[in-house]
Image (cartoon, grey):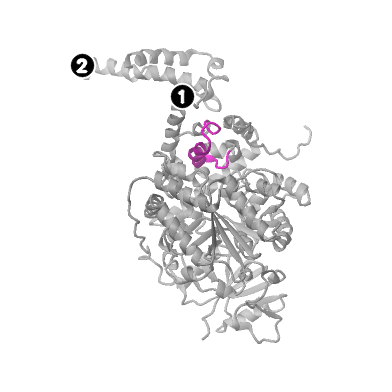
Amino acid sequence: MSSTDSRAAIFAAIRANRPNIQPPLPEVPLFDEKAPSDLVTAFSEMLVKMGGKVLDPQGQDPVSALRAAVAGQGIIATCVPELHGDASLQIRQILPEMDPHSLADVEIGVVRAAFGVAETGSLCLTDDGLIVNTSGYLPQHLIVLLDPSQIVANLHNAYRRPELSTHRYAVFQTGPSATADIEGVLIHGAQGVRSLRVLFCPKQG
Amino acid sequence: MPARGPEPQPRGAIIRGNRPIDQQEAARRFMDAPEHLAMHDQRLWDLRKKRDGQKEIIEEWEDLRQLASDIKTHTLTHLDTYLEQFEKNAIANGVRIHWAKDAAEHNSIVAGILRSKNARSLIKSKSMLTEECGFREAMAHEGITVVETDLGERIQQLDNENPSHVVVPAVHKLRTDVAEVFAKTIGSDPNNSDVSYLTEQQREHTRPLILKADAGMTGCNFAVAETGSVVVCTNEGNADLSANTTGLHIVSMGIEKIIPNLNSLAVFVRMLSRSALGSPITQYTSHFRGPRRGAEMHIVIVDNGRTDRLGLEKFWTSLKCIRCGACMNTCPVFRRSGGLSYGATYAGPIGLIIDPTFNRHKYSTLPFSSTMNGSCTNVCPVKINIHEQIADWRQVLAENHEIPAFKKSMMKAAGALLASPKLYRASLPMADSALRHLPRFVLYNRLNTWTRGREMPHVPKETFHQWYKRTRGVDGKKK
C-alpha cells in the first residue's frame, strides 16, 4: 500500500467512524485577571524553582556581569552582540553557516531569549536567537539574556505571541536539562545543559 | 545469616503468543519483591501528591480540565478537517508528510526515508507510538542502529525491556538494577549505584552516539493544525538534540495528537507536566514548525487502530488521552504491581481501556485489574471516564465470551442470586453465619482470590431486613 492509498483509507475510516455530533470549539480565556504586577519577580521565583539561576547584574551594567561570568571558563560561544569585540575573552561567534556539531566542545553558550513566561519561569528561544539550534543544547552551560520588559504573565499570553507561529523552531526552555528517571532523584544535566543562568539585560538598539 | 546482594528485579508478565496476559501472576512476583514494591509505590504516590499540589495552586484547574476535554471532543469529531489543515500547513512549511495505516507501514516508511539518505544510525527521543509499532526491533532487521536518548528509555533499551510507564519508563527499577544494567552494557562500575554517577555515565556514553548519528527522530505530544507544527515535551532536552543535531528529523505522530490551534495548545501545555510529574512545565517544550535551513523534516502520521477506536461508541473518548500517566500514578493496582505486569504497551488504567482495542483476546483479562475506585477518572486532565469504561469493557468482554470459565460461572451464580429477592434474602443469614463460623483455612485459600492480601469484612449479627422487621415490624411503624 502506498502512503497515498493509506491516506485515503485513513480519511475514509475517520469519516465512517467519527461520532456524529457537532460540539463547538470552546473559546480559551487568558486567565490573567490575577496576574502579579511584578512579572520580573514572579518569573525569577519560578525560574529558581525549576533549577535555573538569576545572574546578579553587579551594579548597573549587566554586560560587565556577563563578562565576569564567562572570563576564564573555557570555550565561550555567543549568539549575542554584547560580548563581541572584547579581545580579552576567548569568544567564538555563532554563525548561521556553522555545523550543529561544531558546538559540542563549548563550555558556556550565551544566547538571547525572545521573551519569558512568569507562570512557569520559561524562556522562549527561537531559531533566529539561537542562530544554530544546537547552541541551546550542546554547550555544557547556558547563559540567557532576557529583556525584563519582555515577560508575559502565563502560557495563554505566550501562545498569542508571534514567535510560535512564525519561527520554524521555538522552544520554551525552563531551567537546565533535568531527569528524575532513577528512583525519582532529581539530577540536572541529563542530555542538555547542566546549568542555566538568566541575566536581565534590555535589548540593544 | 549469609550476606545478601541487592534484591533482584522482578520481571514483567510472561507473554505466551496470543494467550490472555496473566497480570495477576506477574503482579504477585512484583509484590514478592519488597524493596521494589515499596520504592515503586512511594515514588508514584509522591508524583500524585505533587500533582495535587499544582492543582491547588492553579485556581482555574477544573476550568482547564473541562476546556481540555471539550477541545478534544471537538477535534476528534472533526478529525478529518484538522488533519487536512495540519497537512496543508506542514507541507507549506517545507515538511514531508507520510501516512501509515498500521505499525508495519510506519516502520517501512521510516526505513525507506533512512535508506534514501544512507542513514545507518538514528537517535531518538521517547515515543509511545514507536513502542506500539515495535520500531526498534523492526529497525534492527533493517540494519539500522537506534539509540534512545531519554535516560529512562535508554535504561529500558539496554535492559531489553519495554517502558513500564508512559512518562517514567524505568520507574520500576531500583538504582542497583540500573547499576547492574549499565555495568553490563556501558561498562560502568557495578558496585557504584549512586544516581548522579549513573546519570553522568549515561550522558558520557550517549553524547558521542548523538554526535555521530545520521538521523534524528522524535515523537509528538501535540500537533497544531493552525501552524502545521509538532510539539514535543521533554525534561532532558533530548528531543531537541535528536531533532537538531543531524540533517534529518523524522516525527512519529498518531492521528489523535492533532489540536486546532495555539490557544488550545496553551491549555494542554499547562496541564501535561502538572498532571504527570507535578511540575509546572517540562524543562523543554519544543515547537517544530519546519525543517532547519539545509535540513529535512518528515512527519509520519499513523492510524494503527485509532480510527477503529473512534467508531466504538463507549470507548472513543479514550482517544483524548495526552499520555500524562496521572491515572497510573494514582492507581493502587498499578503502584503495587508495576507497569510491566500488564504485558502491553500501555499499562495502568488507560491501558485497561486501550489495550483491548488492539487485541480483545490477548488483553481480555486487563479490565479486571482494577479496584474500580474511580481515582483515575478524578485525576484525568482531559476528563476521560476511565473507570466507567473499564466497567463497560468487562461487560463487552463477557458478552464476547472473553472471560475465564471460573469467573463466568461465579458471575452466573451471583446473577441468579441477585435476580431473585427471595433467594437473595434467604441466602444472606446463611452466608453470614457461615462466614462467622467457618475455620480460616476454608475462607483463606487459593480459590478465594478476594482474601489474597486482605481480610474478609466483619459480618453483622443480623441483616438489614432482619433488623427492620425486628424494630419496625411488618407495617413499618416503629415499635
User: Quarter of the image holding residue B30?
Assistant: top right
Kind of residue sitting beneath label 2 = Asp
Host chain of mark 2: B
Q: Nearer the viewer, residue B255 or B275?
A: B255
Mark 2 in CB contact with mark 1 (< 8 angstroms): no
In the displayed structure, A205 sits above or below B40; it is below
Residue B91 location, x and y as percent? 50, 64
Q: Residue under circle 2?
A: B475
- Which mark identifies residue B457? 1
Q: Position of residue B35 (x, y in %)?
A: 65, 39
> How dense is the environment of label 1, judged by Cα within 10 Å: few (below 14), some, or many (20 and up)?
few
Left or right: A70, with A155 as reference point: right
Region rendered in magenta: B344-364
> Any mark on residue B406, and which?
none
Asked if residue B380 shows in the view, the reply is no
Dots 2 and 1 on the same chain = yes
Q: Nearer the viewer, residue B86 or B317?
A: B86
Where residue B382 appears, as percent x and y from the top left, is 42, 49
